[in-house]
Amino acid sequence: MTPTIDFSGLRITYDERVLEPRPWTADQSQWAAALMRTAPPGRVLELCCGAGHIGLLATAATPAQERRQLVAVDLNPAAAALTRTNAAAAGLSNWLEVRTGDMSAALEKGEVFSVIIADPPWVPTAQTSRFPDDPLLAIDGGGDGLTVARCCAQVAQRHLHREGTAVLQLGDRGQVEALDAAAYGLRVTEVRDGERGVLAGLRRLL
């Protein structure tokens, strides 16, 4: 049977092709949901969505009258399929658009999003052997763990609303500093420590 997990009230289906949802990542969903209540009008973008649990929980946690369309992007076709399955199970299919492929190519020039949720792999390549049960595509962040995170920052630079906020998941505060958000026209507004990993709020430089 395909495994499922209770992710803060959502039943999320996943398999060996994607990263098993971690309960602590619900903190990212809750932060994004809070932003969705006050952000300027517009859609929400989730990058590296995996099984879709973080973006779907953020959508489900937002009151119906304040809910926004979610565009979920992942390079892995299996992730896209699971995200659709999980949206249907949660009754959120009408709020979801899934795109498969490279995150830069999956977005059209001029598309703008009021909230961006980014869940890139952030484990340095040399350390991925510590996690043999996790699919490599979902955890390998390159030499310093920031290869995909930099792509997320580039997407935010091009597609984040001028008054919007991105919430980026990384491994630790050192990675947040090493990312050098200013190089992408962004500034770090807040960093929150999680049970494992950190969340960084990013906004455009004034």
Image (cartoon, rainbow, N blue to C red):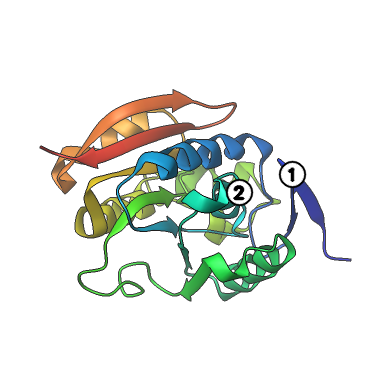
Placement of 178 over or under 44, stated as above or below: above
Placement of 202 over or under 81, stated as above or below: above
**Residue name at image x 37 percent, y 34 percent:** 200
Q: Report which quarter residue 148 is drawn in.
A: bottom left
Q: Amino acid at mark 1?
A: Gly
Category of crowding for the residue at label 1, using alpha-carbon neighbours closer than 10 angstroms: few (below 14), some (14–19), many (at least 20)? few
Q: Is residue 192 left or right of residue 158?
A: right
Q: Report which quarter residue 180 is drawn in.
A: top left
Q: Is residue 35 left or right of residue 50?
A: left
Placement of 17 over or under 201, stated as above or below: below
Front residue of 145/2: it is: 2
Front residue of 164/187: it is: 164
Give x and y (percent) for residue 99. Answer: 46, 74
Check contact, mark 1 vs mark 2: CB within 8 A.
yes
Quadrant that contains the N terminus: bottom right
Give x and y (percent) for residue 107. Answer: 32, 71
Residue that label 1 marks: 9
**Residue name at image x 41 percent, y 58 percent:** 45
Give x and y (percent) for residue 136. Answer: 57, 58
Residue that label 2 marks: 57
Category of crowding for the residue at label 2, using alpha-carbon neighbours closer than 10 angstroms: few (below 14), some (14–19), many (at least 20)? many
Circle count: 2
Give x and y (percent) for residue 28. Answer: 51, 39
Cα–Cα gap, marks 1 and 2: 8 Å
Residue 69 in view in this figure: yes
Q: Amino acid at mark 2?
A: Leu
Number of the label disc, if any, that sits on residue 75: none
Placement of 198 over or under 110, stated as above or below: above
Front residue of 26/137: it is: 26
Residue 15 in view in this figure: no
